[in-house]
Amino acid sequence: MPDERRGPIVSALPIDRPGKIVCVGLNYRDHAEEQGTELPSAPLLFAKWPNALIGPGEPIVIPHVSKQVDYEAELAVVIGERVRRASEENALDSVRGYVCLNDVSARDLQFSDGQWTRAKSADTFCPVGPQLVPAAEVPDPQRLGIRCVLNGEVMQDSTTANMIFTVAEIIVYASATMTLEPGDLIATGTPAGVGVFRDPPVLLKHGDEVTVEIDGLGSLTNPVQDER
């Protein structure tokens, strides 16, 4: 992985580096059920830092401090215009486009730290791509099939219709307290099938290849390697 980046950090994005990567936890009914968690009454927001961003084909690097790195296929929203206190009726007007995202997570750090920042923001833990699809070409973001494929095996297979909170509702909730700026990313949550809750668990390891597929948005594929 290069130490310096020149030009856009991810070619799929319209800006060099998003100011914010806003994420939503437990936003699919089946994902909440697979871990025995009650459905949230409001979106559970957390953040990933921009240092985690990588593009298609770049390696996800397992840090030496973690032994439980997991995949999460997600629909990501790219904000196109400044928005504060959006209404549900106009929230989608602020969206520039949509893209595949893998919310890579170090589960051992996530469960031991008591909060998610370190587990979610390791370098390379936010693959995004392969392209930004304009919002006009996605008439309904709540009708998209979403899958994660690990080494050719389908691990997650769902639809954005299973979200607890819609894209519009997430934008309304987030913008009630924070200004969303052009280029900001919103990762809208992952469906059931993550590795840590499988029996036995299926976690990422050196040599793996993981792909996020979303209908109409393409496929985002990244190899996995150990930190050197």
Image: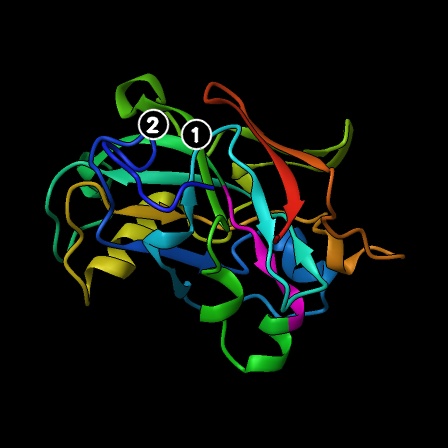
Considering only vertical position in the picture, is 187 above or below 85? above
Q: Residues within 10 Å of mark 2 (few under 14, many from 20)?
A: some
The answer to whether residue 94 is left or right of residue 33 is left
State the residue lying farthest toward the right. 200
The answer to whether residue 157 is left or right of residue 123 is right
Residue 217 locus on image (x, y percent): 45, 22
Q: Mark 2 points at which residue?
A: 12
Which of the 4 quarters of the picture holds residue 222? top right
Q: Mark 1 points at which residue?
A: 129
The answer to whether residue 112 is left or right of residue 122 is right
How far apart are the two marked residues, 1 and 2, measured between alpha carbons?
A: 6 Å
Q: Residue 204 carries which label?
A: none
Residue 134 locus on image (x, y percent): 28, 22
Q: Does the segment drawn in magenta span residue 29?
A: no
The answer to whether residue 23 is left or right of residue 175 is right
Q: Which residue is drawn at 89% across and 57% down?
A: 200
